[in-house]
Image (cartoon, rainbow, N blue to C red):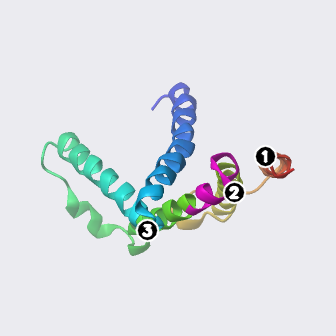
């Protein structure tokens, strides 16, 4: 994939986060349940992904490839479910802007830690001055948001 395509893709992907927070928050006004909202969110996403699998793999989904995957690598949906439920609660209580700001700050911290230690199969990318500066800027932005 060309690197000139990655930045716009990252921006568009990032813009989906507050939209997802707001959509799930709106649904929770009707479900009155973060768990039911998360189930609806994941259920709808699962349907889209299943259709995508069938289209991309032309009806022959290579499930056998999962046999060699470490067990922990199959837990992304569990982590995502907790993430969705947390985002629903945070958005309802704090509003989308503060909830997203807090989540982004936490994501940067977790991402830097995962990279630094090469955890969960990632290539090790040690913390350096530039990466530390990014963290300080993100935390500074969070501090400004909390004023």
| Left or right of residue 79: residue 112 | right
Label 3 CA crowd tier, 10 Å (few <14, some 14–19, many 20+): some
Label 1 CA crowd tier, 10 Å (few <14, some 14–19, many 20+): some
Residue 57, relative to residue 41: is it above or below? above
Mark 1 to mark 3: distance in Å? Answer: 34 Å
- Judging by the rendered image, the residue that carries numbered circle 3 is 35
State which tag comes first along the sequence, 1 or 3: 3
State which tag comes first along the sequence, 2 or 1: 2
Where residue 64 appears, as percent x and y from the top left, is 21, 63
| Left or right of residue 1: residue 11 | right
The prevailing secondary structure element of the residues shown in magenta is helix
Element under label 2?
helix
Residue 79, relative to residue 91: is it above or below? below
> Where are the magenta residues, as a range?
89-98
Residue 67, relative to residue 124: is it above or below? below
State which tag comes first along the sequence, 2 or 3: 3
| Left or right of residue 6: residue 129 | right
Residue 114, relative to residue 136: is it above or below? below
Numbered circle sitting on residue 134: 1
- Marks 1, 3: nearer the viewer: 3
State if disc 1 and disc 2 touch (CB < 8 Å).
yes
- Judging by the rendered image, the residue that carries numbered circle 2 is 112
Who's the residue at 51% across and 33% down the image?
Answer: 9
């Amino acid at each position: 994939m060309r690197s000139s395509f990655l930045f716009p893709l990252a921006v568009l992907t990032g813009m989906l986060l507050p939209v997802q927070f707001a959509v799930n928050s709106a649904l929770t006004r009707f479900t009155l349940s973060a768990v039911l909202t998360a189930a609806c969110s994941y259920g709808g996403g699962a349907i889209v992904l299943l259709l995508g699998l069938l289209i991309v793999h032309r009806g022959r989904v290579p499930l056998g490839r999962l046999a060699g995957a470490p067990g922990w690598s199959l837990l992304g949906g569990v982590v995502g479910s907790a993430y969705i439920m947390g985002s629903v609660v945070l958005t309802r209580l704090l509003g989308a802007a503060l909830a997203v700001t807090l989540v982004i700050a936490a994501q940067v911290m977790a991402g830097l830690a995962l990279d630094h230690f090469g955890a969960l199969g990632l290539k090790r990318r040690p913390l350096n001055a530039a990466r530390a500066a990014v963290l300080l800027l993100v935390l500074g932005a969070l501090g400004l948001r909390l004023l």
